[in-house]
Amino acid sequence: MKFFLDTANVEEIKKALEMGLVDGVTTNPTLLAKEKRDPNLTIKEILSLVRGPVNLEVLAIDAKGMIAEAKQLATLGEQVVVKIPMTEEGMKAVRALHEEGIRTNVTLIFQAVQALIAAKAGADYVSPFVGRLDDISTVGMEVVSDIATIYSNYGFETEIIVASVRNPLHVLEAATMGADIATIPYAVIKQLMKHPLTDIGLERFLKDYESLKK
Ligand code: G3P
């Protein structure tokens, strides 16, 4: 299972890289805006740090504009994957980019049939947003499970990126379902490593060994 970091924060990427936990990075306009600096500088820095896929999103909403933007983004590094929104115009762009050998990740997927469409259009990745579905009382991970079934039924090679991950349970379910990738905020990566019994156990080991010195 691959872990992508869902962030545009360079410090978080550096910390996760030290633990070998960055198989790739996903950004979006919101995450880039959160950094409050020139997004071009942020992108450049991320590309200098990360060898795996770095997902950068287009801002255009028409196919022609998306294709032009995607081509420009693809010149920034060979690890660039272009995020395209799940719209009719987006699917035209995905098809054209597929034919040009530019990799795409179809984003803002909220139902399994959207992922079927994206795969048929030629997407390399799809990003179902599980947390945002949970927010409106729909079980996001069920969408992931349906997409996995559809892709396995027909042998699609499009990879599933579980996105909008909000907690460790999303990661656990993604892993048990065999999702290809989870894109995870740094705060959730930290939660994945924590257990109170680990802390208590470590404290006791150190205390017991200290008692030898008395
Ligand atoms: O990968 C998509 C992600 O950035 C969206 O997450 O928490 O804004 O729904 P969230």
Image: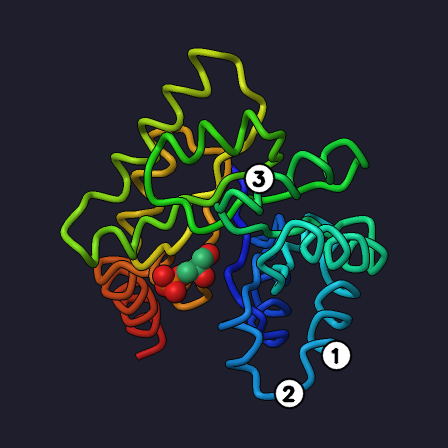
Q: Which mark is on residue 37?
A: 2
Q: Quadrant of ligand 1?
A: bottom left
In this rendered view, identify the residue nearer to me: 199 or 162: 162
Establish if 23 lies above or below 185: above
Dot 3 crowding, Cα within 10 Å, few <14, some 14–19, many 20+: many
Look at 64% across and 69% down and name the residue there. 14
The CA distance from mark 2 to mark 3 is 31 Å
Identify the secondary structure beneath mark 2.
Answer: loop
In this rendered view, identify the residue nearer to me: 166 or 17: 166
First in sequence: mark 2 vs mark 3: 2
Q: Amino acid at mark 1?
A: Leu
Does mark 1 have its CB less than 8 Å from ligand 1? no
| Quarter of the C terminus within the rendering | bottom left
Q: Which mark is on residue 41?
A: 1
Disc 2 to disc 1: CB gap under 8 Å: yes
Q: Amino acid at mark 2?
A: Arg
From the top left corner, tell me how far across and down residue 40 is, in percent: 74, 76
Look at 34% across and 69% down and name the residue there. 206
**Residue 189 seen in the figure:** no
Identify the secondary structure beneath mark 3.
Answer: helix
The CA distance from mark 1 to mark 3 is 29 Å
From the top left corner, tell me how far across and down residue 137 is, in percent: 14, 51
Quickly name the residue at label 3.
91
Q: Which mark is on residue 154?
A: none
Disc 2 to disc 3: CB gap under 8 Å: no
